[in-house]
Image: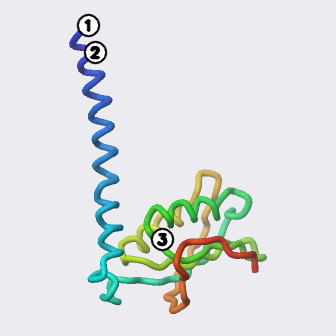
């Protein structure tokens, strides 16, 4: 019985450490994005406008986008469009923007994404990630 308890404890400990390890590289990359050296290299920053189509309104897509974009250290905005789509502007490191694009292809659990259009953008992303009014 003692060995079973040790195995269970070891399993919990492994899962705890495994989840901590997956967070640490993200924290390192976020801190690297805020260093003066990283910010002076404009080629390391990417800004794109994304239009997500499908069942993406009324399924918590905007709040999900805000949470994910903030987690990735992105600046920009998200809004509903009157045509039923969701539009967002993502700006940050190339890797973080690409990761957010991939996450948008899946969306939150109740969303059904049928299309994703990506456009390069020179728009000002602002200083944080925020929700904008519907257009």
Image location (x, y in percent) of residue 75: 50, 75
116 or 75: nearer the viewer: 75
Eye-nearest disc, 1 or 3: 1
At 56% from the left and 60% from the top, the residue drawn is: 107
Looking at the rendered structure, which numbered label has been put on residue 1?
1
At 26% from the left and 14% from the top, the residue drawn is: 4
Question: Cα distance, mark 2 to mark 3?
Answer: 43 Å
- Relative vertical location of residue 84 with respect to residue 55 in this rendering, above or below: below
Looking at the rendered structure, which numbered label has been put on residue 62?
none
- Relative vertical location of residue 18 with respect to residue 57 in this rendering, above or below: above
Image marks 2 and 1: residues in contact by CB distance under 8 Å: yes
At 74% from the left and 59% from the top, the residue drawn is: 58
Relative side of 10 to 133, left or right: left
- Relative vertical location of residue 110 with respect to residue 7 in this rendering, above or below: below
73 or 122: nearer the viewer: 73
> How many numbered marks appear?
3
At 64% from the left and 64% from the top, the residue drawn is: 62
| Among the two numbered marks 2 and 3 on one chain, the one whose residue lies closer to the N terminus | 2
Image location (x, y in percent) of residue 69: 50, 66
For the view shown, which residue lies furthest in the right direction?
A: 82
Image location (x, y in percent) of residue 76: 55, 77
64 or 71: nearer the viewer: 71
| Among the two numbered marks 1 and 3 on one chain, the one whose residue lies closer to the N terminus | 1
Question: Cα distance, mark 1 to mark 3?
Answer: 48 Å
Would you name the residue on which mark 3 appears? 101
For the view shown, which residue lies furthest in the front direction?
A: 36
Graded by Cα atoms within 10 Å as few (under 14), some (14 to 19) or many (20 or more), the crowding at tag 1 reads: few
């Amino acid at each position: 019985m003692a060995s079973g308890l040790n195995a269970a404890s070891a399993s919990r400990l492994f899962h705890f450490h495994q989840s901590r390890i997956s967070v640490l590289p993200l924290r390192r990359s976020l801190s690297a994005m805020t260093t003066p050296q990283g910010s002076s290299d404009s080629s390391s920053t990417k800004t794109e406008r994304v239009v997500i189509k499908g069942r993406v309104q009324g399924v918590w897509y905007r709040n999900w986008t805000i949470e994910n974009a903030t987690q990735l250290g992105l600046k920009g905005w998200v809004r509903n469009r009157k045509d039923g789509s969701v539009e967002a502007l993502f700006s940050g490191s190339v890797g973080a923007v690409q990761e957010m694009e991939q996450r948008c292809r899946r969306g939150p659990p109740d969303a059904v994404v049928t299309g994703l259009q990506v456009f390069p953008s020179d728009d000002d992303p602002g200083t944080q990630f925020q929700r904008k009014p519907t257009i």
